[in-house]
Amino acid sequence: MRYTAKTISTATSVAALLGTLAFSLPSISIAEDASAIAEGKKIAFNRKKGNCLSCHVIKGGKLAGNIGPALSIEGVAMKDRFPDKSKLRAQIYDSRTANPNTMMPPFGSHEILSDAEIDKVVEFVYSL
Amino acid sequence: MKKVAVIVSALCMLIAPLAGIAANPDQDLKDFRDHFTKKFPSVPLQDFTNGVYSVDKASREQWEAFEDFPPYEIYVDKGEDIFNTPFKNGKTYSSCFPQAEKGIKQNFPYFSEKRGEVVTLEVAINECREKNGEKPLKYKTGKMAHLTAYLAYKSRGHKGNVQIVDSPESMAEYERGKKHFYAKRGQLNMSCADCHYYNAGGKVRADILSPAIGQTSHFPVYRNKWSLANSSGDGMGTLHRRYGGCNKQVRAKPFKAQSAEYRALEYFHTYMSNGLTMNGPGVRK
């Protein structure tokens, strides 16, 4: 929930600054979530960024590889595969924590993606 | 004193098997082969010399059509011309490579005890040139690739016959090459083995990964990609050019062509295809 938590807290402080609670907080964060998911998808699909498609089948992506398990599986939500979202983040941040000999790049530890980018990718993958 | 003896013998027991593991190219070769013959039970051993086309039936037909009018043919001819053109001193390459007509590529690389290093065909060619007062050639493209294409062609039909000399210096190079093959490297943290051993036959985006066994039998190769305007050269490239490309793919800094590191890698990598029939030059995507 990293990204969401951050957005909520900024949203809250902005709201506090403006001295108005006219916006309802949940709707702001839902909108933010949707854009995080969309941005996360772009990062995941970008060959120079996540390039996750080189190894994973993901809905909406073309020319996917098959080195890793499909991330979009009909009838199996990512939320069920990773009830604990922080485990999903850990898998993307540094997959070696789960499998020391993994072929999946350590996106966080090797600074392939920034923390903020990883947060967005996590939101995207969690929506699958 | 008794205690010391016990410790010493315990140490020996520890070290002995380790020493055995550290240098056993025969066993490595057997394990390497077994890995691929088990992974691809329907592929005859010799067919691995066809690289990715041994495991990707879909693209094989297209490739076979290519081989009917091979784009490397003119470079084999060019290489033959270069080979037979005398140096300024009147001698030719055959003064260094008297057996070239019969095929010599299968015996490269080899470990020179005298010099304490791995000698590849490319290095031997440049030495021949320098011995005869000529400038060395660049290692990845151009004339070097043409010459080796010709020599590879002459070696067709011979079986890979790399000898791993049983000396500490030679074994150290062999081990260095083996380590390079299995070591994770680059920002993406991948080894040659990740792509061409464990996941051979798998798909990275639309690319099918060739098995490491048989990868060296057909070099140099003509690649469409290497013939494009934004690429250097005319399509032909040497094995070390490919090594550099694969290192770059994982965002690792490539070593220089014919660096000690790549020569060691070639020593190990080519030995793993011993017994497979030479079929260079090749054509690849």
Image (cartoon, rainbow, N blue to C red):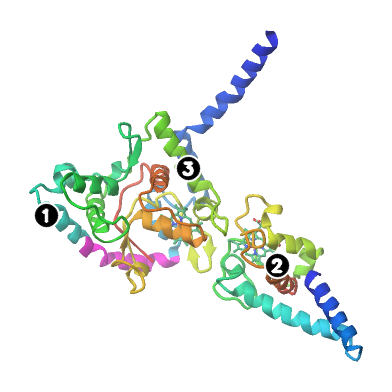
- Which amino acid type corresponds to the residue marked 3 in the rendered image? Lys
Q: Nearer the viewer, mark 2 or mark 3?
A: 2
Q: Report helix, strand or loop for mark 2.
A: helix
Range drawn in magenta: B58-75
How far apart in space, not on screen, are marks 1 and 2 (Cα)? 60 Å
**Seen in the image, is B186 located left or right of residue A91?**
left
Quarter holding the N terminus of chain B? top right
Q: Report helix, strand or loop for mark 3.
A: helix
How far apart in space, not on screen, are marks 2 and 3 (Cα)? 35 Å
Q: Disc 2 sits on a residue from what chain?
A: A
**Seen in the image, is B115 located left or right of residue B254?**
left
Pick the front one: B243 or A14: A14
Vertical side of A43 occupied by B136: above or below: above
Q: Which residue is mark 1?
A: B85
**Seen in the image, is B96 located left or right of residue A106?**
left
Rendered location of residue A94, percent (x, y): 68, 58
Q: Are marks 1 and 3 on the same chain?
A: yes
Q: Which residue is mark 3?
A: B178
Q: Is residue A98 visible?
A: no
Q: Which residue is mark 2?
A: A115
Quarter holding the C terminus of chain B? bottom left
| Type of secondary structure dominating the magenta stretch | helix
Mark 2 crowdedness (10 Å alpha carbons): few <14, some 14-19, many ≥20? some
